[in-house]
């Protein structure tokens, strides 16, 4: 098994800083990297629609001199014939050197990483994590602000299903002086496993509010998100919540002059196009930064694989098949033969599913 990245916690803060440093070097000296991955293949396994992330991975590998194979929808893969993720991962390991995978179920990339003999990068697993979007976010914040410490960061919109939010909060918990403002309707609050398991566990300062306008004046970063229609089981609830927040040019007048607006894209209507003209709008720069960071991550994981660096997650406390995960979004809900694996949390009698991180009490 090779070292994979399922979420940002799989990388130490030194490694995150190292990836950022490589990205800066790529920006300054692209020629130096043009042949670094010559002869290597990236497999992009996208079981769920994507434009940015898949093409960003593909562009990253091509700019490193490597090549790309893969598919962009579940219907064109053997998943439509009922193949398990484990088998797909084993098969692709015979064809490629590294995998980038997106899948609608939480924990799917973890399953792939356990079965592949090459590194797996999670390009989004359901509403769970999206670490390479976080790399794009971190480089953008660093380029705009010159630091990753001492920042007041507002997250606005769908904090429940927005996987990019979960991964960025995880990453920011490794830096100091971060204040988090969580702006969402009650129905779309940040999940408990992130609120308690990341913010509270790391003693991070945070507040929850429904009010975007009054939060704006204190923020260094505003991270807008799309209401994630595809994750709602109830279409009426989506209709009711879809227009919860719209950032307009008028609202931008309430914000600091150097506030930076981020959005992982695609945008629906949560940022008015008028805001694009504002110099504080950084979401298109974020796209370009994502490509540089994916280049840096691919390089790092291929290097680690070559040097035999082992996976970092300690699974010695895992209990298998004693509890069943009841999260309908977890990969264990559709792949019946997977072991149900849990590890203890800091709370008495509370265990966390290793795939989707939902907590279960026994
Ligand atoms: C995000 C995602 O897929 O989670 N998009 C992306 O990767 N750039 C956010 C979203 O779809 O809203």
Image: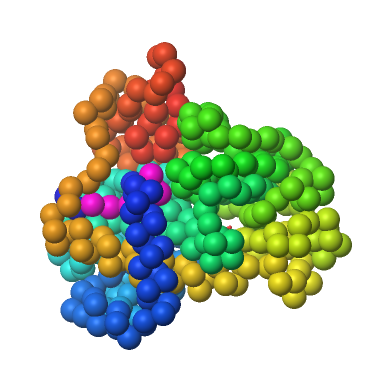
Relative vertical location of residue 215 with respect to residue 321 in this rendering, above or below: below
Magenta residues, start to end: 3-9
Q: Residue at x 41, y 21 (%)?
A: 346
Instruction: Count all numbered tags in the image, as a single digit.
Output: 0
- Tell me residue 276's x, y (percent): 72, 72
* Identity of the residue drawn at 18% across and 59% down: 305
Q: Position of residue 2 (x, y in %)?
A: 19, 53
Q: Dividing the image into four equal quarters, which quarter contains ligand 1?
A: bottom right
Tell me if 124 is positioned left or right of 314 in this view.
right
Quarter of the image with the C terminus in it: top left
Q: Position of residue 37 (x, y in %)?
A: 23, 76
| Quarter-of-image position of residue 324 | top left
**Quarter of the figure with residue 312:** top left
- Relative horizontal placement of residue 357, taking residue 338 as reference (left or right): right
Q: Position of residue 190 (x, y in %)?
A: 60, 38
Magenta span dominant secondary structure: loop
* Front position in the image: 333 or 257: 257
In the displayed structure, does residue 225 sit left or right of residue 312? Answer: right
Q: Residue, x 27% and y 62% (percent of image)? A: 300
Left or right of 108? Residue 175 is: right
Q: In terms of depth relative to the viewer, which is nearer, 257 or 337?
A: 257
């Amino acid at each position: 098994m090779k070292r994979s990245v399922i979420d940002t916690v799989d990388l130490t803060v030194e490694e995150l800083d190292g990836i950022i440093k490589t990205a800066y070097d790529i920006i300054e000296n692209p020629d130096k990297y043009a042949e670094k991955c010559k002869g290597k293949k990236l497999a992009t396994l996208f079981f769920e629609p994507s434009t940015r992330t898949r093409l960003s991975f593909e562009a990253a590998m091509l700019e490193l001199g490597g090549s790309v194979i893969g598919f962009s929808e579940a219907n064109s893969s053997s998943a439509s014939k009922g193949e398990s993720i484990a088998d797909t991962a084993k098969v692709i390991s015979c064809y490629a050197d590294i995998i980038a995978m997106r899948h609608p179920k939480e924990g799917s990339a973890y399953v792939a990483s356990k079965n592949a003999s090459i590194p797996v990068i999670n390009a989004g697993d359901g509403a769970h994590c999206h670490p390479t979007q976080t790399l794009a976010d971190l480089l953008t914040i660093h380029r705009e602000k010159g630091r990753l410490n001492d920042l007041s960061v507002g997250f606005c919109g769908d904090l429940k299903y927005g996987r990019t939010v979960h991964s960025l909060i995880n990453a920011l918990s490794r830096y100091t002086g971060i204040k988090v403002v969580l702006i969402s309707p009650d129905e779309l609050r940040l999940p408990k496993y992130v609120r308690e398991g990341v913010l509270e566990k790391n003693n991070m300062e945070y507040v929850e509010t429904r009010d975007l306008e009054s939060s704006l004046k204190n923020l260094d970063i505003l991270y807008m998100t799309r209401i994630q229609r595809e994750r709602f089981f109830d279409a009426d609830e989506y209709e009711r919540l879809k227009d919860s927040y719209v950032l307009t040019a008028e609202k931008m007048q309430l914000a600091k002059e150097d506030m930076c607006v981020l959005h992982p894209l695609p945008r629906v209507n949560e940022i008015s196009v008028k805001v694009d003209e504002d110099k504080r709008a950084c979401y298109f720069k974020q796209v370009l930064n994502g490509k540089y960071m994916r280049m840096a991550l691919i390089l790092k994981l291929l290097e680690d694989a070559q040097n035999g660096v082992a996976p970092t997650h300690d699974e010695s406390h895992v209990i298998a098949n004693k509890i069943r995960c009841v999260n309908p979004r977890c990969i264990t809900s559709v792949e019946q033969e997977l072991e149900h694996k849990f590890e203890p949390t800091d709370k008495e009698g509370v265990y966390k599913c290793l795939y989707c991180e939902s907590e279960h009490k026994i």
